[in-house]
Image: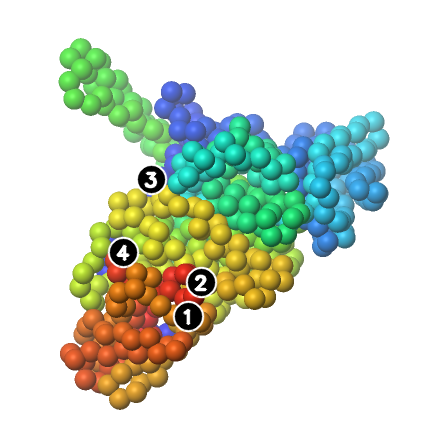
Amino acid sequence: MARPHDQGKTTNEKKATLDPTHLKPSSYHPRTMKVILSILTLGVLPVLGELKLPAFFSDGMVLQRDSSAPIWGWADPNAAVKVTFAGQHQTAKADAQGNWKVEFTGLKANDKGVNLSIETPGSTKVIQDVLVGEVWLASGQSNMEWTVSRSQGSDTEIPSAQDELLRVYVSGNVAIDTPQKDFAGSWKSTAPANTGAFTAVGYYFGKNLRKELNVPVGIIECAWGGKSVQAFTSHEAIVALPEAKNLVEQKAEALAKWDEAKVKANFEKAKAAYEDKMAEWKKEKKGRAPREPRMPSSPAVDPGMHSTIYNGIIAPLVGYGVRGAIWYQGESNANPASSMNYEELLGCMVADWRKRWGYDLSFYWVQLANFRKPTDQPGVESHWVTVQDEMRRALKSIPKSGMAVINEIGAADDIHPQNKHDVGARLARWALARDYGQKDLVVSGPLYSGFQKRGAQLVISFDYAKGLASRNGEPLKRFEIAGEDGQWKWADAKIEGESIVLSSAEVKSPTKARYAWAENPTGASLINAEGLPASCFTTE
C-alpha cells in the first residue's frame, strides 16, 4: 500500500507518573492518586483461602444480558462454590490454587437491582443491587478518560443526571510487567454526586443506548491518558507483530540499560540539589520555585511501554461479559515511530482482545479530531493526519468495527475537544445499527470508497453519501489533486449525486486526490444528509 512520506511534529500528551514513593501527597493529581491507590491496595493475587472477587464484581455492577456473564474469584483450594443469581444456581470447584469460575447464560434485562450470592463452606459473600443489561468497555487515552465535569455542557448535565440504570465502573490505573488479576474501582450509578467523575465519552455513549434500548447499561472505564495503543496490547501479541519490531526493541533496549542502583543514586543527587535550591528560593522567593525531582520508574512498569497497561487493567477484565468496546486513542501514536503502522497496531490489539475474550466483541473507535494551527496550503504532511487515515483504513481490515469522525469539533490549542456529547452519540450510532438492529440508522459521514478518472477530472465515490452537501453552504474546500509529478494542488470540488467531481486548472491529468489532509483542515465542510462529517482520505 503506497503511503505518503509524512513529516511533522510528534504529538505527546502529558505523561502520568507512576511512582508513589517519591511524591508528596500535596502534589498528587486526582488521576495519579487513583494510580497509586491501585498499586498500594491490590496485589497480584488475594490471600490464599480467602473468598474474594475482583473489584469489578461488586455492588451495583451490570452483567451482560442474553449471552454469557461469567463470575470468577478465589477461595480455599478445592472448595465447592455455589453462585446464585436471578433464579439460576451455578456451581464450581476451586482448583489447587483456589481459582474458580461460573458462567450465567441467557440472563434477561431487569429494571431493578437484585442480589447475587457466592457461597463456600464457612463463607458467604453477597453482591447487592446487580443489574442485567448491556455492558461495554470504554478504553483509550485521555480523551476517553476525560470526565463529564470537564466537558462542554457539564453545568447543566450534571445537576440533571439521574438514572439508576446507567452505571459506570470508575477505575484506577495500573502499569506492571505481568498480567494482574484485579485493579481498583467501583460501580457508580448516574446521579449528580457521581456523574462528574465519569468518562464523558463513555457516559454519553451509554446515555444514547439507554434512550434507544430502554435496558440497563454498564460502562467499564479502562483508559489512561497519554498512552500508546501498544501499551494496551499483550506482550505475546505485540512481539509477534512485524510492524511493532521497533517498539519491542525500544523497550528491550531500555530494560537492558536500566540500572536501578545508578538511577537511585542519581535521584538522591538530584533530590539533594533540589533541597539546596529550595532553601535558597525560600529566602528570597523570586521567580518560580524549583521543581522537585521524581524517581524514574523501571521500563518494565512504564505505562508508556508496550503491554504494561494491558497487564494492569485489561488482563484482569478478560472474560467479563461485554457486548463490545469503544476506543478513543491515537494521539500518542502520532509520531515517526508508529503513525504509519497504526492500522496494524490497532488491528493487533483488537485481535488480541477478541482472542482472549473468546469471541468477536464489537469494536468502535473515535478518529482523531482536528488539532493544532490550521493550514492554508496544499501538500502539507503530518503524523496526525496519517494516524487519522490509518484509522479509516482499519475499517476494512478489522471486522465488526466502526469509526466516529469528529474532524470539525476539535480546537487548535486543545488536544481535548470539549464536546464529548457528539463523540458519544456518533459512537452509539454504530452500536445501535450493528449490534441492536437499527438497520436504517446512518452510522457515519461520507467514507471514501473509490475513484475514477474522467478526462481531466477525478470522480470520488463514498459510502454513506446520501445528501452530500457543504456544512456551511459555501463551496467545498480542502480537496487536493496531483498528477504524475506528485505536486498537490487545491481542487475545485462539485457535488454530483453521491460523488464529488474534482478538477484543477493547474493539473491537466490528475492521478490522485485527497481530502482534509491536515492536522487542522479548516474549511473542510463535506457532510451527508445526517450532518455527519466526511473523513479525511487519500487515494494513494
Location of mark 1 (residue):
467
Place of residue 135 in the rendered image (x, y in percent of width and height, measured from the top left): 62, 48
Name the amino acid, label 2.
Glu
Which residue is drawn at the image coordinates 79% and 29% (left, top)? 124
Which mark, residue 31? none
Q: Is 197 positioned to the left or the right of 376 in the image?
A: right
The three-letter amino acid code for the residue at tag 1 is Gly
Mark 2: few/some/many CA within 10 Å (<14, 14-19, 20+): some
Is 422 left, or right, of 132 in this rendering?
left
Q: Nearer the viewer, mark 4 or mark 1?
A: 1
Question: Which quarter of the picture shows residue 178?
Answer: top right
Residue at 48 percent of width and 37 percent of height: 157
Picture layout, residue 466 above or below residue 126:
below
Residue type at tag 4 = Asn
Closer mark to the observer between disc 3 and disc 4: 4
Residue sitting farthest toward the top: 283
Q: Is residue 365 above or below residue 130?
A: below
Which of the labelled discs sits on residue 520, or is there none? 4
Residue 137 can be seen in this image? no
Q: Are marks 1 and 2 in contact (CB under 8 Å)?
A: yes
Q: Gap in Å between the C-alphas at discs 3 and 2?
A: 36 Å
Q: Could you tell me how far apart the alpha carbons at marks 3 and 4 are, in whole angstroms?
A: 21 Å
Residue drawn at (30%, 61%) of the image? 472
| Mark 3 to mark 1 CA distance (whole Å) | 41 Å
Q: Which quadrant of the figure contains the N terminus?
A: bottom left
Question: Which residue, given by chain and number where applicable, does mark 3 sit on?
Answer: 14
Label 2 sits on residue: 530
Q: Secondary structure at mark 2?
A: loop
Say whether residue 305 is left or right of residue 174.
left
Residue situated in front as seen by the camera: 108 or 141: 108
